[in-house]
Image (tube, rainbow, N blue to C red):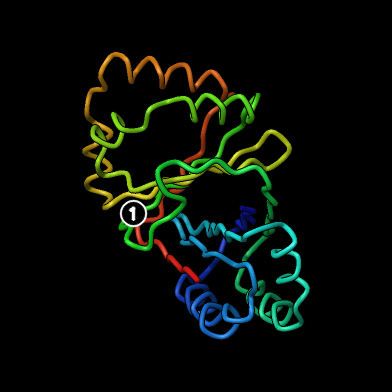
């Protein structure tokens, strides 16, 4: 899987939603290798989207389509400042890579010292205890930017269930595992809460 992360400030979330709906309706059928997209706007007007493709080549072919270029030329006018892009070839999936049934999505951005080490550690963990402890988590993924940055996404059944789950006291073994996992990170994470996520799939 290959993921492109797009992020920037927007003035009118409704107009951006209409643009993405138009892409899903008119351009997605011709986007060979596109798997789906997760997007939304935070309370402070930050737009973030993760477009998932089968491969980097598939993403490039989509970007090279004339209709894609025209769509972006129009959509980019809806941003009020700089738009950043992160091309992510290293992906780690937890439970499931996405869910169109999610009622709340949290995007977390941070820096890691060793993404390969983090991914290997996560793969060694048995996910059954976490699934049972946090049934509000549908799935998620980590996407490495290639420069030490990372974007992670968690899909929840609802925001209320997510907040309730956050307040639960973790069992000692699970808490130790989480503390070990945090050793791979550096700096303070930035949280982007998508209370009304826009979820698209092929």
Q: Name the residue: 76% across, 82% down.
A: 66
Q: Position of residue 161 (x, y in %)?
A: 22, 45
**Which corner quadrant of the image does residue 137 belong to?**
top left
Q: Position of residue 98 (x, y in %)?
A: 43, 55
Q: Name the residue: 34% across, 18% down.
A: 175
Above-or-below relation of 113 to 50? above
Q: Name the residue: 27% across, 52% down.
A: 157
Above-or-below relation of 170 to 128? above
**Which corner quadrant of the image does residue 60 belong to?**
bottom right
**SS of the residue at dot 1?**
strand
Q: Position of residue 184 (x, y in %)?
A: 57, 22
Question: Dot 1 surroundings within 10 Å: few (below 14), some, or many (20 or more)?
Answer: many
Q: Is residue 73 left or right of residue 169?
A: right
Q: Is residue 44 left or right of residue 26?
A: left
Q: Which residue is mark 1?
A: 104
Q: Position of residue 56 (x, y in %)?
A: 72, 57
Q: Name the residue: 39% across, 52% down.
A: 105
Q: Is residue 15 left or right of residue 89?
A: left
Camera-nearest residue between 65 and 167: 65
Numbered marks: total: 1
Camera-nearest residue between 116 and 16: 116
């Amino acid at each position: 899987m290959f993921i492109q992360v797009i992020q920037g400030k927007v003035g009118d979330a409704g107009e951006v939603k209409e643009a993405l709906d138009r892409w899903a309706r008119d351009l997605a059928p011709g986007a060979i290798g596109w798997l789906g997209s997760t997007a939304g706007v935070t309370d402070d007007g930050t737009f973030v989207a993760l477009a998932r493709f089968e491969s980097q080549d598939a993403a490039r072919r989509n970007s090279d389509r004339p209709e894609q270029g025209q769509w972006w030329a129009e959509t980019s006018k809806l941003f009020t400042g700089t738009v950043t892009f992160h091309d992510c070839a290293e992906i780690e999936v937890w439970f499931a890579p996405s869910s169109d049934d999610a009622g709340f999505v949290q995007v977390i951005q941070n820096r890691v010292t060793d993404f390969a080490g983090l991914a290997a550690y996560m793969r060694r963990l048995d996910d059954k205890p976490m699934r049972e402890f946090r049934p509000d988590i549908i799935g998620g993924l980590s996407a490495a930017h290639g420069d030490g940055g990372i974007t992670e996404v968690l899909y929840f059944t609802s925001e209320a269930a997510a907040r309730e789950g956050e307040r639960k006291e973790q069992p000692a073994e699970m808490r130790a595992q989480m503390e070990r996992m945090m050793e791979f990170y550096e700096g303070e994470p930035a949280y982007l809460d998508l209370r009304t996520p826009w979820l698209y799939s092929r």
